[in-house]
């Protein structure tokens, strides 16, 4: 019997989070994708603080396909990281498969010079 998609994503997410953790010098770049929106945030797990966040709802003027908007989110989170003198991050895809919107966020961040 197949498991529900949400259950499978939660299992993948727990497995990833057991291995991935962010610090102040190398925070975790977390990507959350819902059916309507995409969010990316930089998280310091040692202190339990969010260093910055970018969401597609912040970019109301942006039009285009979801992958194009996600690429712009990746570029903006990379610029936010540069402002905080962060050059390297640990990528956390949040249990989602690495394709489509999640991949576009990562590629957008890489294109602005952020090392994943």
Image (cartoon, grey):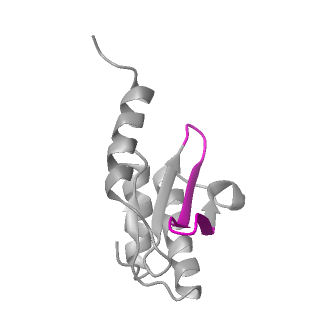
Residue 70 as seen in the image, left or right of residue 97: right
Quarter of the image with the C terminus in it: bottom left
Q: State the residue lying farthest toward the left.
A: 1
| Residue span colored magenta | 34-52
The residue depicted at 43 percent of the width and 48 percent of the height is: 94
The part of the image, by quadrant, that contains residue 34 is top right
Quadrant of res 52? bottom right
Quarter of the image with the N terminus in it: top left
Residue farthest front in this picture? 46
How many tags in the picture? 0
Q: Is residue 80 magenta?
A: no
Q: What x and y, as percent, mark residue 43?
A: 54, 66
Q: Is residue 91 above or below residue 17?
A: below
Residue 96 visible in the picture: no
- In the image, residue 50 lies in the stretch drawn in magenta: yes
Residue at the top extreme, as displayed: 1
On screen, residue 108 versus residue 38, left or right, reads left
Foreground pick, 111 / 26? 26
- In which image quadrant can residue 13 be found? top left
- Which residue shows up at 45% across the image and 28% down it? 6
Coordinates of residue 111 in the picture (x, y in percent): 39, 76
Q: Please, is residue 80 above or below residue 53 in the view? A: below
User: x%, y% of residue 35?
Assistant: 55, 37
- Residue 27 visible within the image: yes
Q: Residue at x 36, y 30 (%)?
A: 8
Measuring 52% from the left and 49% from the top, which residue is drawn there? 32
Residue 101 pos. (x, y %): 44, 51
């Amino acid at each position: 019997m197949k498991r529900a998609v949400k259950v499978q994503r939660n299992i993948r997410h727990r497995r990833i989070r057991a291995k991935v953790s962010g610090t102040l010098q190398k925070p975790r770049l977390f990507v959350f994708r819902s059916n309507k929106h995409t969010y990316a945030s930089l998280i310091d797990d040692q202190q339990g603080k969010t260093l910055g966040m970018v969401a597609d709802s912040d970019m109301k003027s942006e039009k285009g396909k979801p992958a194009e908007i996600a690429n712009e989110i990746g570029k903006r989170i990379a610029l936010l990281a540069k402002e905080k003198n962060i050059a390297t991050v640990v990528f956390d895809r949040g249990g989602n498969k690495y394709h489509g919107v999640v991949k576009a966020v990562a590629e957008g961040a890489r294109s602005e010079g952020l090392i994943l």
